[in-house]
Image: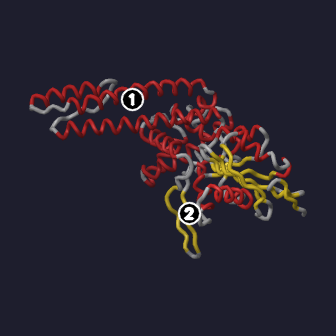
Amino acid sequence: MTRRRIRGIVALTQQDIWIGLDCGYLHTSACAIDQDGLIIAQEKCETTTASVSAFLGRFPPESLRLIAVEAGVATHMIRDLLAAGYPVKLYEVYKAQRFLAVRRQKTDTNDAIGLAELGRVGRSLGAEVHLKSLECQNLRTRLIARQSLVRVRVRLDAMVITIVRMHGGKLKRRVAKGALSQDVEEQLDLLRRDGVDVDADVRPLVAVAEALDEQIRSLDKRFAELAQTHPVCRRLMTVPGVGPKTALMFYSAIDDVSRFKHARSVGPYLGLTPSVYQSGVKSRQGGISKKGCTATRTLLVSAATVLLVSVKKSSALKAWGDALRARIGISKARVALARKLAIVLIKVWQSETDFDPRLHAASP
């Protein structure tokens, strides 16, 4: 193997090259290494397609084995590089960080070197991440935004209830649009008769909570309409317990159903299978791993709970869940049924047919 230096870069003849890109919002540290792990070139450039492409263009396209990038940053640039034919692979942040933590000093330069090494030797780590389509990415953004709005609204409700109760007032349970505002006004009138004036503290919170309610209802209406018109999500909603938000979230989490050769693989992907720890003679099985998308897993567990508690129509899937509930209790049964639901949803998607209540009774 021959080496020669050109403009500060060690050029290699017939050499495979791995590249690591530590992408920041403004700048990207890039590092190229050879098959022996020796550094060929390093550079810090802007996080733009043009700047990163200029660095990659220094090497023959056929020599680039893999370009390793940590998931979560500069997605737009990654899409451009993939469209240009570069062999880019995304790696899960948690696993990548543990790999990079081997180095004593955490710097952007060292992280770029570590990512290049991860791409070169880490093929068996199972740390690669699927880059979702733009459609699914935008859909997940809206769904997670709704969850954030719900969390803020719940906290505002709790603050209002706390303030009113602190002064002896009581609030009824909210059952309809505008119910909180009406109940609060009644309680404020009663408190004023007792000489307590907390209007300035409570009314702004109620106004914001009601505005959030309006936004959440609007989003729910849009999600319901979208799920009904989407060919895949409409079919997923034929599974009992699965509503528009669950169908949309599951669709956006999977994106490409062909990624799953076996339907049972979706359970570990969503963190719904038990974790296992083995060391020497010790071996124990814990709770579910909770890896993957938390929002999707939560909605699947909610769908399983609905199927166990609220759905009256009989099906092999419900019978399976009811039998499990009687044996191990609802807490564990709904998690196991959520894993089963994920498998059923994958099968329905792959078969391009509606849910058949007579089928899907086998254990996951």
Most extreme residue toward the bottom is: 281
Q: What residue do we see at 19% from left, 32% from top?
A: 198
Q: What residue do we see at 57% from left, 49% from top?
A: 292
Q: What residue do we see at 44% from left, 37% from top?
A: 148
Residue nearest the viewer, comparing 253 with 329: 253
The answer to whether 189 is drawn above or below residue 115 in the figure is above
Any part of residue 264 in sight:
no
| Residue type of the residue flagged with mark 2 | Val
Mark 1 neighbour density, 10 Å: few (under 14) some (14–19) many (20 or more): some
Instruction: Report whether 170 appears left or right of 322.
Output: left
The answer to whether 55 is drawn above or below residue 153 in the figure is below
Instruction: Report whether 321 appears left or right of 26.
Output: left
| Residue type of the residue flagged with mark 1 | Leu
Residue nearest the viewer, comparing 49 with 279: 49
Q: Position of residue 125 (x, y in %)?
A: 67, 59
Residue named by callout 1: 212
Q: What residue do we see at 52% from left, 53% from top?
A: 290
Instruction: Report whether 271 appears left or right of 207.
Output: right
> Residue 36 got which mark?
none
Quadrant (top left, top right, bottom left, bottom right) of the N terminus: bottom right
